[in-house]
Amino acid sequence: MDHQPWPRLLARWQDGRLHTLLLHADGRRAHATDERVADGAQLAPALADTLAALHRSVHHAVLMTDTELATDTLSRRLGLATLCTVSWARALRLAPEDEAGWTGAARALDLALHTQVSGGAISSQIRAAYAHLTRCERRVADVVLANPRAALEMATARLAEAADVSQPQVIRFCRALGFDGVKSLKRALAESLASGASEAPAGHPLLMRSTQALRGLDGATLALAAETLAGARQVDVLADTAHAPLRDMALQSLWRAGIPARPLLPGDLPSTSPGVCLALGSTVAPLPGSCGVWITESAQAGGTPLQLVTGAEAELAPALLATLALQLLLADVAASRRRPQRPREEAQHGLDGLIVNRPPRRAGLRAQ
């Protein structure tokens, strides 16, 4: 990267107050400020004063806010290489364990930075930074450069053993390149290999197609689908023959999360109480009278708005892309169930106004 990756500025503009933290490579948060910023016109000067008061140059920052801002203009005024904005709701989804949202904001910035570097070869990035690495960090770099694909499959302990260094030295190597840790480096390395950007042989077509399909998933729809499943009284899981293994995966994950779920077979009736139907496959559709979440290969006209479209699947690995999409969805469901429940109007905050159409109440039925 052209700019030093650390430290990074974390900022939150909420309720007329601007809070800032300085995030260091070792995870420390320092230089906390809190000042009144009433409107957007005062935001840029306040952030500029904060940056000027620091003893070190900051090139990357994240702003947690629910207000629409011209991010490119603001980043140029502040002289930042990267400035990303993230809503408070998305920050919570990225890190449900931190109710303040700081950890989620930091992860959003990390994702933004890695998206920028993923288009180029990670090998080239390591070579560019090689002269500035310590002796132990260079040993790790040598292992990764010698065989990027093998390094991608190594656990941290195995990578440290191959480089003859300690595991903390492996983590320091990752942070010297601007990554939060080993997982972040491996994620960027996998994307680089999948896009064929590295000097290694071109990525496997199946891996390339999977990466492209997952990038095409709509984040807001995925988040709303997860919230819908997490709050359901009953989930009916419907799948065609090709996606039957996914039905079993979904049922087990929902049960572990404490959500009542059942497989729906031909001839079965949907839940009588307002429930959710999880439909898996392009030949099935959510049942009438239920809120539907649909994982399908192509968008279906007239279907539920909560469609997670994965694109065509590879012939040699049926349902692979749907499997990846389902895993992402179920991970978000589990995170939502672990997070303490808030009032419904607050839980829906930041979902861009997407509303799930609940089934109409049948005539003659009374609420139990």
Image (tube, grey):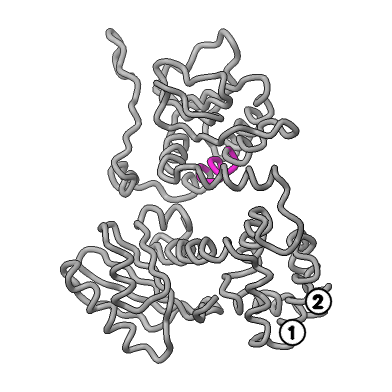
- Disc 2 marks which residue? 163
Q: Is residue 189 above or below residue 26?
A: above
Q: Position of residue 45 (x, y in %)?
A: 22, 79
In the rendered view of the protein, which quadrant contains the N terminus?
bottom right
- Disc 1 marks which residue? 136
Q: Check disc 2: other Cα within 10 Å, few if <14, some if 14-19, many if 20+.
A: many
Type of the residue with mark 2: Ala
Q: Which tag, 2 or 1, sits closer to the chain's start? A: 1
Residue ID at (28%, 77%):
47
Residue 128 within the magenta-colored segment of the rendering: no
Element on which disc 1 rests: helix
Type of the residue with mark 1: Cys
Residue ID at (44%, 46%):
219
Q: Position of residue 246 (x, y in %)?
A: 64, 31
Q: Check disc 1: other Cα within 10 Å, few if <14, some if 14-19, many if 20+.
A: some
Residue ID at (56%, 34%):
311
Q: Which residues are magenta?
A: 326-333
Marks 2/1: CA–CA distance: 8 Å
Residue 331 within the magenta-colored segment of the rendering: yes
Along the viewing direction, whichever of 291 and 121 lies nearer the viewer? 121
- Report whether 195 appears left or right of 342: right
User: Among all residues in the image, which is located at the extreme bottom?
Assistant: 55
Q: Position of residue 302 (x, y in %)?
A: 39, 21
Disc ID at residue 246: none
Pointer 2 with pointer 1, Cβ within 8 A: yes
Q: Is residue 178 above or below residue 85?
A: below
Taken as a whole, is the magenta stretch helix, strand or loop?
A: helix
- Tell me where residue 313 sits by quadrant: top right
- Report whether 41 appears left or right of 106: left
Along the viewing direction, whichever of 341 and 304 lies nearer the viewer? 304
